Structure formats: C-alpha cells, structure tokens
C-alpha cells in the first residue's frame, strides 16, 4: 500500500522585497460593504493552473455556507475586482505560486480564491479582522500572507484544533513577508482584535488570504 503524507501547517518567510512592492496596492481598496464596519476594505480574484500556467478566471461573486461563516454565510457577495496591474507583478505572482506549489493546487486544477484585505483600527476602538470568531472556511487549504502591519497591537494569528479549544495550537503575530498555510479541514483559525498603538493614528493590517 502506498503511504502518503498529509499536509498540516507550514509557515515560511518570503524574500524581503515582496511585501514593500505590494503595499501600495492596498491604499485604494473599496470598503467591504458586507461587513457593518468602515474599517474593512477588500478585493477578490480567482486563479487556476492550466498547462503549467496560472491563469486568472473571470470575475464572479463569492458565497460561503452559513455552516462555516456565521456572519455573512449564504450571502452572495460581489467584491471589487483585484487590480490587474498588481496581479501581473512578479511579487504577487511569487506569493500566488508559493501557495499553489505548497498545496499542490498547481497540479490538480483546483480553483484558488484570493482575497486582498485591509483592516484598520483606532487607538480608542478595536477592530475585528475575523468577525466570524474561531472558524474554518470550508476549503482544503487556507493561507494568510502579511503585507503590512503599521501602528498595530494585537492581530494575532491563532490556530486551534477545535472551535471550543481554550488555548490555540499556534498563537503568533504574522510580520511582513511571513506566510502561514494550514489544512482547513483539520484546524480552525482566528485573528485576534487589533488596536492602534499610536494615539490619533490609524492602525493598518494588510493581508492576502488564499483558499483552495
């Protein structure tokens, strides 16, 4: 019988020039109109490997089951299209290929969803990067790549073995250029609340979230 390993969690650092080349593309993101907050901004794109090339699929709406998303589950969401010029940069392509190669989605023709998300916060009011709480996304794999953390305290990336676990399996701050990928069917994840660390200044957390 053939023995096969099972992917669980991988965390790694990309080259230091990746995140700085992508951060400016977050400045003009539109507000996420599906969350009752003016602190969340978002765009969306879909990709698939075809004949050894990664292609962008036509834009479409995005829906998650309420089984996985208790906040906006079963709602068809029409996010803004991700910026074409950013997608074509070698820096974004490096991040996308890193996710697909590590999860094998560059070989099995899986559709990869990518969400470009900015969450801001103030010094006197917290923001919730993951309003769903401890959750799964309903995919095989979830990846989070940090592009920018500015004037922020909190925002810990937390991975749990179950949704009722008191202590996370992993509890860490993803710094710029750091990438974590997890088996979404095995683990649950959460991002803790953020608060601006500078009085009178906005705190900013910019990430790409990959699912497949």
Image (tube, rainbow, N blue to C red):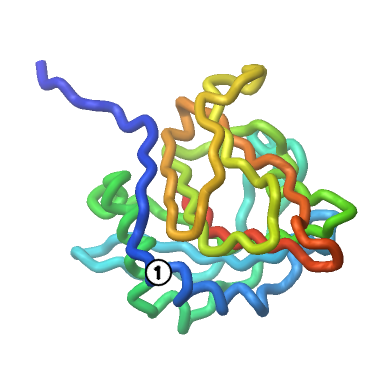
> 117 and 125: which one is in front?
125
> 148 and 144: which one is in front?
148
Residue sitting at x 77%, y 51%: 195
Marker count (numbered)? 1
Of the 4 image quadrants, the one containing the N terminus is top left
Residue 175 lies, in percent from the top left, at 51, 53
Residue 166 lies, in percent from the top left, at 66, 18
> 205 and 153: which one is in front?
153
Residue sitting at x 64%, y 71%: 80
Residue 33 lies, in percent from the top left, at 79, 63
Q: Is residue 142 above or below residue 175?
A: above
Residue 62 visible: yes
Residue sitting at x 58%, y 20%: 162
Residue 78 visible: no
User: Among all residues in the image, which is located at the extreme front?
Assistant: 198
Q: Find residue 171 and report its image quarter.
A: top right
Q: Which residue is mark 1?
A: 18
Residue 35 lies, in percent from the top left, at 79, 55
Left or right? Give the position of 160 relative to 87.
Answer: right
Left or right? Give the position of 115 relative to 96.
Answer: right
Q: Is residue 102 above or below residue 62?
A: above
User: Among all residues in the image, which is located at the extreme right?
Assistant: 124
> 170 and 50: which one is in front?
170
Residue at disc 1, secondary structure = helix
């Amino acid at each position: 019988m053939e023995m096969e390993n099972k992917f669980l969690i991988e965390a790694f650092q990309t080259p230091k020039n990746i995140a700085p080349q992508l951060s400016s593309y977050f400045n003009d993101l539109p507000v996420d109109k599906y969350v009752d907050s003016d602190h969340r901004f978002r765009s969306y794109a879909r990709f698939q490997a075809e004949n050894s090339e990664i292609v962008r699929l036509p834009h479409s709406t995005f829906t998650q089951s309420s089984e996985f998303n208790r906040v906006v589950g079963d709602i068809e969401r029409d996010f803004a299209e991700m910026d074409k010029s950013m997608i074509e940069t070698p820096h974004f392509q490096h991040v996308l290929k890193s996710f697909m190669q590590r999860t094998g989605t560059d070989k099995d023709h899986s559709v990869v969803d990518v969400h470009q998300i900015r969450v801001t916060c103030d010094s006197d009011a917290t923001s919730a990067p993951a309003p769903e709480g401890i959750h799964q996304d309903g995919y095989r794999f979830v990846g989070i790549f940090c592009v920018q953390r500015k004037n922020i305290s909190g925002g810990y990336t937390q991975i749990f073995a179950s949704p009722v676990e008191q202590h996370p399996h992993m509890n860490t701050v993803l710094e710029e250029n750091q990438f974590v990928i997890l088996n979404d069917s095995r683990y649950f994840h959460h991002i803790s609340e953020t608060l601006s660390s500078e009085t009178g200044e906005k705190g900013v957390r910019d990430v790409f979230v990959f699912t497949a």
